[in-house]
Image: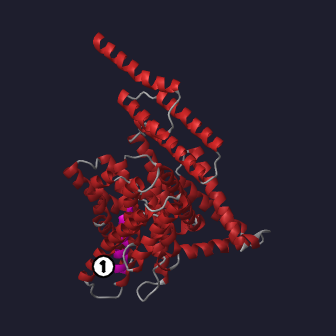
Amino acid sequence: MASIELVISAFLLLTFIAAIISLRLKLPYTLVLVLTGVLITVVINLLALQGSPIQAPTQNVINQLQLIYRQLILGGGGGLYVGLIVPPLIFEAMIHIHGSDLKTVIKPSIALATIGVLIATAVTGLILWQVIGLSPYVSFLFAALIAPTDVVTVLEVFRRVKVPSKLATLLDTEATFNDATAIIVFTIILSSIGLQHINVFNTLFNFGFTLGAGVIIGLGVAFAGEVLSSLIEDRIAETILTIAVVYGSFAFASGIGASGLIAVAVAGLYFGNFTIRTALEPATREAVQIFWQIAAFIGNSVAFLLIGFQANIITFPESILIILAAYGAVLVSRAATVYPILAFFRRISGNATKVWSNIAMLGGVRGALSIALAATITTSAVISETDLHTINTMVFGVAFISIMIQVPLLSNYVKRKMPEPAASPEAQLEDQFAKIAASIEDAHHLKSDGKLSDKEFTERLDENRVELEKLIAKSKASLETRKIIQARASALFPPLPKRAKRKSKTEPENEEKEYSQNSGNS
């Protein structure tokens, strides 16, 4: 037990160090985590050599890491990874997607998530089979499980790489929804090994049920959560309710054979566009968002450290040719998917520019979900132990190389082609005012709970009043905007002192006089 506690403590320390390195060196956090995992694996393997003075404790740490890996990834259907780590990442990303952005890009994103996965599977499988010379089952099994862009990787990349919101929504939605398509295609290929015929009708029905039932369950659970949230006025209880919505929708959908990830994605979209705006108070909204940001950070750290731990650089040279061949096939299939589909929608709506296509190409990163799918393959009369080793080697290699190469290239390309826009003065003003409003609301809650004395409550109100006056004074907003701010301020505070009142009244009058004088002079 002590060794497990040591591993958990070391994991938390590693995530903290990786975050600092990422900020200091301005490197993608995902890249730092993978490299950290690789470095630790190399060091541990060297320390575990025969004759090392710390061979026994080092081997104990290796055993614990392998145990955690087997439980997270090698469990049936992906184990705890798909059911525990992925849902918070999807939910946290979806609550930040605006309905207007989704409406604009929903058609190309669904096309990439369905038709795109089929094209990618076919192209990758044909290249590995006809060009590289692998067996057809190995080629198409690998093609199916590597076809979807990894939702964990894509969400993390586009959280840190600043791109237009519509483009981020396009690729986030693709990464979320293509999992269902890929899992169905992979299951069909896996179950058809040794069979002569495939029931097309059942296949289409299962696909429609997986997607449709997932959407309906996500909507239903999210709506129930919104109703319950409107009856609660406690931040902790409402945060726990969102946890129940996330894992409840996933468990319910998975339990009836639908896509749990689709259900979580739809629940997140509903929560972000409706519940968070209508049923949550500002302070509660901020608390919920912070909680899921922390959950997503921990989930990302687990996912990318696992990839780093399993990408054993020491054994890479033995399989480098087959890994490079597989990675080349994946790149070709991604290009055959992205450019034709986005070009088609560019001609229709004009939204998907060529720069978007290039970013979508680089953003097709693979990750731990493909590794989890590969773990479900077992040996059979057709798939030998050697074939299984080949598939796992290609999956780990492609995931590792795509993160190591495509993530830095994507970051540099976005910085060159899409410089980060500065926040508008109106947006900065709204953000600062929202923080002041949340602070005042928090003070009211603390006072009503008896955790804040009258004196402390008055002091906190005075502090916020001063901040608000500074905000009004330094703002370069128009006369109408300033009136709106002052009207909202009057609803937050008791009547201002006479001097402040006189100032707030005379300032607009003076501005109106100056405006009329300037108009007359002009």
| Magenta portion: prevailing SS class | helix
Q: Residue furthest top?
A: 521
Is residue 75 in view from this perspective?
yes
Classify 187 as above or below 270: below
- Lateral position of residue 436 relative to residue 118, left or right: right
Image quarter of residue 146 = bottom left
Quadrant of the image for the N terminus? Answer: bottom right
Question: Which residue is located at x 57 percent, y 62 percent?
Answer: 305
Tell which of 221 and 387 is nearer to you.
Answer: 221
Q: Quadrant of the C terminus?
A: top left
The residue depicted at 59 percent of the width and 66 percent of the height is 309
**What count of labels does the image hold?**
1
**Which percent across, then down, holds residue 246?**
45, 67
Question: What is the crowding at mark 1: few (fewer than 14 residues within 10 Å), some, or many (at least 20)?
Answer: some
x, y (%) of residue 300? Answer: 53, 60
Q: Is residue 54 shown above or below 476?
A: below
User: Can see residue 394?
Assistant: no
Span colored in magenta: 175-189
Find out whether residue 181 is within the magenta segment.
Answer: yes
| Residue matched to label 1 | 206
Q: Residue at position x 52%, y 64% from top?
A: 240
Element type where label 1 sits in the image: helix
The image position of residue 332, as x and y in percent, is 34, 61
Looking at the image, which is closer to me, 312 or 243?
243
Residue 439 placement (x, y as % from top left): 54, 44
